[in-house]
Image (cartoon, rainbow, N blue to C red):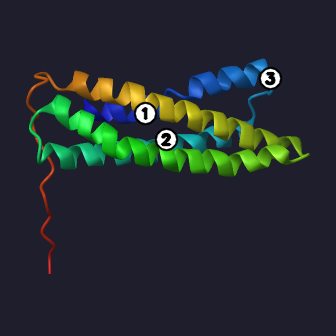
Amino acid sequence: MLVLTFIFTPARPITPATTRMGLAGVNMKVSTSIIFTIAFGIAVDDTIHFISKLRLTLGHEPNVFKAVRRTYLLAGKAVVVTSLILVGGFCTLLFSSFDGTFYVGLLIGLTLIFGVVAELTLLPLLILGVYKRPGRARAAAPDAVPARV
């Protein structure tokens, strides 16, 4: 069930971005679909960051609600900062006079902004919904993984 969380949360920001694209009169082409592939990959990276931090937190905090809250406070900052840096980097493409480059910056920037909002609003709710008993977690990541020699 957690896999559906991985897929749904990063895919969700693509809908508002494609809506804005349609309102702006930008046609869906191979180049614009590649833009969403890039943005989806970055959103998946943020989701993995959040989930892996949650699994580590669940190793120390058996209460799912408290673990999600702690993860939100710790990993949420990192997700916001990295996404803002990436949005700033892609927004430099908005100064291009070439339409293709301009739309790459615009669409990836918008998708990343929508992605952060989905990441920090939907993902914690979906995680809490996955666990049947919100008080206790079923499994947690180990503190350390032994290395093979």
SS class, disc 2: helix
Q: Nearer the viewer, mark 1 or mark 3?
A: 1
What amino acid does circle 3 point to?
Ala
Q: Which residue is mark 1?
A: 119
Q: Is residue 21 above or below residue 143?
A: above
Dot 2 or dot 3: first in sequence order is: 3
Residue found at x 25% / y 39%: 70
Residue found at x 74% / y 20%: 22
Residue farthest to the right, as pictured: 97
Q: The C terminus is located in which quarter?
A: bottom left
Q: The N terminus is located in which quarter?
A: top left
The 10 Å Cα crowd at callout 2, few under 14, some 14 to 19, many 20 or more, is many
SS class, disc 3: loop
Q: Which residue is mark 2?
A: 43
What amino acid does circle 1 point to?
Glu
Quote the CA–CA distance across marks 1 and 3: 25 Å
Q: Are marks 2 and 1 in contact (CB under 8 Å)?
A: yes
Q: Nearer the viewer, residue 149 or 75?
A: 75
Q: Nearer the viewer, mark 2 or mark 1?
A: 1
Q: Which residue is mark 3?
A: 24
